[in-house]
Image: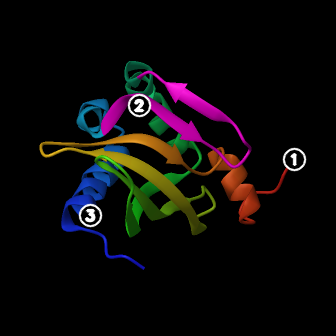
Amino acid sequence: MSEVSQRIQNYFKDFEHANNMYDPELLDPLVNDPLVGAYPSGDVHAVKKGDYLAGTRESGEYLKSLGYQFFKLTPVKETPLKDNYVLVEVKGTARVEQASGKSFDLVHDSFYILHVKEDSIKMVFTITHDAPTQMMEDQGFLTAE
């Protein structure tokens, strides 16, 4: 397993913080325009950066309504690709607290392709989990109704 450079670790600390704050201004310098996401369902979406950022606060409200408290992103493997691109495998953990007082951690693996320049790092592509409720159901924390 390759080591993860300090620069990539720092990027994910910033990305984690921005996601925990649901703050489009903090996310803005960290993502490319457009941003492409692929999901286990086979869906692939290219999203304009402005649209992605505009939905940040709304997504945060939705996740909070499900009990999401915070996200932890830990890069575990960095693989250089070609011409300033790097593939990063990330272990993600989301702490969820339900109204009943029960709490649990949802764990998932994500993969990010980052464009790394001397003065910036931007996410251009991600392979991540499906909808948050699907992740909760898949890991046995939510039953299908």
Q: Main secondary structure of the magenta part?
A: strand
Q: Residue furthest left?
A: 119
Which residue corresponds to mark 1? Answer: 145
Asked if residue 7 lies left or right of residue 1, the reply is: left
Q: Name the image quarter holding residue 6.
A: bottom left
The magenta segment is 31-48
Asked if residue 1 lies left or right of residue 26, the reply is: right
Is residue 19 magenta-colored? no
Q: Amino acid at mark 2?
A: Arg
Label 3 or label 2, whichever lies nearer to me, is 3
Asked if residue 108 lies left or right of residue 91, the reply is: right
Q: Amino acid at mark 1?
A: Glu
Q: Earlier in the sequence, mark 2 or mark 1?
A: 2
Question: Quick check: 109 above or below 35?
Answer: below
Q: Earlier in the sequence, mark 3 or mark 2?
A: 3
Query: Which residue is rendered at x = 23% and y = 35% of the image?
Result: 29
Q: Nearer the viewer, residue 102 or 128?
A: 128
Whether tag 3 and tag 1 are in contact, CB under 8 A, the answer is no
Query: Which residue is rendered at x = 33% and y = 36% of the image?
Result: 31
